[in-house]
Image (tube, rainbow, N blue to C red):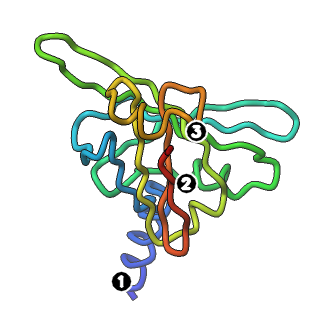
Amino acid sequence: MKFKLCFLLFFGFGQIGFGQNLNIVIEVNERLTTSEISGAYLNFENADGTKSRNLVGYYPGELVLQIEDWEKINSESTKNIILTFDYNTYNGNRHQIGNFEIEMQKYHFEKRYLILRVYDFRERKFKKRYGCLTDKDFIAELNFPQGGILIHCK
């Protein structure tokens, strides 16, 4: 009886305190990010126009989400989901920050894993390779099982 009670308490608090994390690897300019990402948020927009922003954590291979995040992701009223984060780099002694906004779909959160590849056009070779595909300062692709790929410019 005590074992069952302890098990239920442990399991119950585990479900309340933590959400399930999303398996995602983020690469920027063909480099795996380890500690360069800061200020990661999931931005939600509802059908009625209300917006909310939730802080999320990122460790290589995992986007740390809370139960509230999953509730918003699975909500019928959620219309748009955007992952935003800052990418910190150093060019010599100069600190540079790139701000990225990645639009995500609800089905992305159902995949076993995601690979997010961001190409920052501050590096010339990526602007030459993908610059014709967008007017933004970057382009991103999400790879997942049975997903597509980004095609280079000619």
Above or below for 49 versus 103? above
Asked if the residue under mark 1 is in contact with the one under mark 3, i.e. CB atoms within 8 Å, the reply is: no
**Which of the two discs, 2 and 1, labels the residue nearer the N terminus?**
1
Q: Residue at x 34, y 27 (%)?
A: 124
Q: Position of residue 36 (x, y in %)?
A: 25, 33
**Which of the two discs, 3 and 1, labels the residue nearer the N terminus?**
1
Q: Position of residue 5 (x, y in %)?
A: 42, 79
Q: CA distance from mark 2 to mark 1?
A: 28 Å
Q: CA distance from mark 2 to mark 3?
A: 36 Å
The local secondary structure at tag 1 comes to helix
Q: Residue at x 60, y 39 (%)?
A: 82
Residue extending farthest top: 94
Corner quadrant of residue 58:
top left
Q: Residue at x 64, y 63 (%)?
A: 107
The local secondary structure at tag 2 comes to helix
Above or below for 120 versus 150? above
Q: Nearer the viewer, residue 10 or 3?
A: 10
Q: Name the residue carrying label 3.
A: 133
Which residue type does callout 3 highlight? Answer: Leu
Q: Position of residue 85 (x, y in %)?
A: 44, 32
User: Which mark is on residue 67?
Assistant: 2
The local secondary structure at tag 3 comes to helix
Which residue type does callout 1 highlight? Answer: Lys
Q: Name the residue carrying label 1.
A: 2
